[in-house]
Image: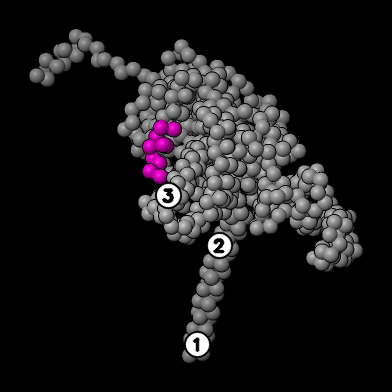
Amino acid sequence: MKFHHQDQQCSSIKMDMMQLLKVAAVITAALLVWSCDNVSANYLKRTSNTALSSYMNLEQQFALESEIISLMQTLKIEEMRAKKDTELDLNEIEIQVNQSKAVHRVVGTDLEEYLNHPFNAFHLIKRLYYQWLKILKKILGKKIQHKGLRLKLDNLVESFPDEEDFITISWGLARMQYLKNIDLTLLVNGTVFNKHSLQKPTVTDLFQISRMIFDEGNFYTASQWLRETLKICKKSGEKNKCSDELLDNKTLNITNILNLLASSLFEMEQYDEAVKVLQELLDVDPHNNRAKENKKFFEKKLKSKKKAPGKMEPKVPEDFQEANYEKLCLKQVVQPVEKTSRLYCYLHPTHKQILFGKAEILSLKPRIILFHDLVNNNITDSIKALGIKEIQSVLELNIYKYEMQGISLDTRMKSQKQNELKRHFANLKNLVFPPLESSVMEIRNFGLQGFFAPLYAPVPTAGGQIGSFLVALNDVLEGTEIVFPFGNITATVKKGSALFWYAIHLYPAICPISHGSLWLASIGYYEGKANYCRMTQRRAWDLRWRPQKKRKPQVTMSNTVNENKKS
């Protein structure tokens, strides 16, 4: 009994240990998942809405403003016709209508050029969110004489950009400036690659963007924007006031800028610089108690700090994929000589041996190939127009908020240009081998935010994927850079160029676009037969494959004699 009791006790201990190990494993897995999600949560919050800055979405938002102008003019006429006294502030409505009409009058028919500038896109989202949406909510909170007009306005509320959209466009504008190395002094004056915005950014605009960057935890970039904002504020000539524009129902003054700048420097442990900024604030406003307390606290931190202050520089992301993405877009990645010496350009043959494609090997492992001038302008323009047409057909009536980045063309859709593009890829020799099937073509549109989403696990597919093509359908001002964070590869594509890579743990990302928008078409290739034994990537590339023709059976005397014997 004694041994039996000990066995029971030991078995119970083993069971407890097993349960503890299982619980520990579950907790560890949960912590790992949480840590990955926590690292990328701040970034995914912004990259998940990259469709916001696409041209199609901005075009819809501009159309929304045109309709709201027309409805407000009708509302004013109906309210003035009514015999009863109106509850609406018609003067406020008229001022906003005149300001927006002035912008639309200048834009005219050149809408694409207007929306291509990042600050014009920022001002459009700001007008709709900060000005029109507030007026619309005031109107809907009061009595309107025309019931049909009220119903129309009520349906449009959901189409307006919200606070998250405004934060996203502000954050995307700042990130574009950093990753594209654009001169901040020129950008805050509305200039990008010698292209000027319709309206020059105000001090309030710059302070709002700086505050959004600060809230995202990018204190270095926030300090750079705040210093430029401070310079413009000092040029206004007034001692304390920076702008007449209201921000949070208050006018912006120089103390707001200095206070946020001191906080940014403190977060970077630049205590001496933070103390100097607060002293400048106290020179302007000697009775600012908050600045006095912060200055005392910063001075204590400065005395207790033993190490010298480090160099102010941008914070490197903790996630290696995001860090690689930033380095590639900043052109800080230098490939070793052992790899670059093996890369080369050549003329890639087709199956017909008549046409050749100008190919450039960007990487051997993993295999990435860039085909220059593979598709002519007639095909790219037709496919881009087809994508725009299909996207516009998806939009519902009176719904202006476009939340899709692109569209997949239906397999039943028979387009001559689409088939020609697929034939271009299928004719390339020693690249993809039959039996194979092509996926549906996808057409996507990207704006100033570009596109990047971290990948922590292989993307599940239906199986049998061979490779993918990516075709640039238009050119942008400073060039299009497609990067592969896992492979540390950068590809600069132009209109008509095609990028090919084999189906491995590899995915492309797009650097921010400083002016204009990018249109891309993608096609994937899959196995045409189940359980088909396909050669590896390296063998497939080196093999001199030729399609074998079916031979007709030859008729001989021996064959006829044998057939007569059987009969």
Query: Tag on residue 383?
Result: none
Residue under the point 11% across and 15% down: 564
> Does the magenta-highlighted stretch encompass residue 288?
no
Residues rendered magenta in the picture: 388-402
Quarter location, residue 450: top right
Q: Nearer the viewer, residue 213 or 185?
A: 185
Judged by depth in the image, the label closer to the viewer, 1 or 3, is 3
Q: Nearer the viewer, residue 68 or 86?
A: 86
Above or below for 244 versus 340: below
Mark 2: amino acid: Ala
Mark closer to the chain start, 2 or 1? 1
Q: Nearer the viewer, residue 427 or 184?
A: 184
Residue lying farthest to the top in this orientation: 557
Name the spot of residue 383 as percent of width and height, x first.
44, 27
Name the spot of residue 426 as percent of width and height, x first.
42, 24
Query: Tag on residue 81?
Result: 3
**Which residue position is annotated with label 2?**
29
Q: Are marks 3 and 2 in contact (CB under 8 Å)?
A: no
Mark 3: amino acid: Arg
In this rendering, position of residue 326 left or right of residue 25: right
Judged by depth in the image, the label closer to the viewer, 2 or 1, is 2
In this rendering, position of residue 93 left or right of residue 322: left
Q: How many marks?
A: 3
Name the spot of residue 39 as percent of width and height, x first.
62, 55
Q: SS at mark 3? A: helix
Q: Are marks 2 and 1 in contact (CB under 8 Å)?
A: no
> Does the magenta-highlighted stretch encompass residue 391?
yes
Residue lying farthest to the bottom in this orientation: 1
Whether residue 524 is visible: no
Quadrant including the C terminus: top left
Query: Tag on residue 5?
Result: 1
Q: Nearer the viewer, residue 245 or 421?
A: 245
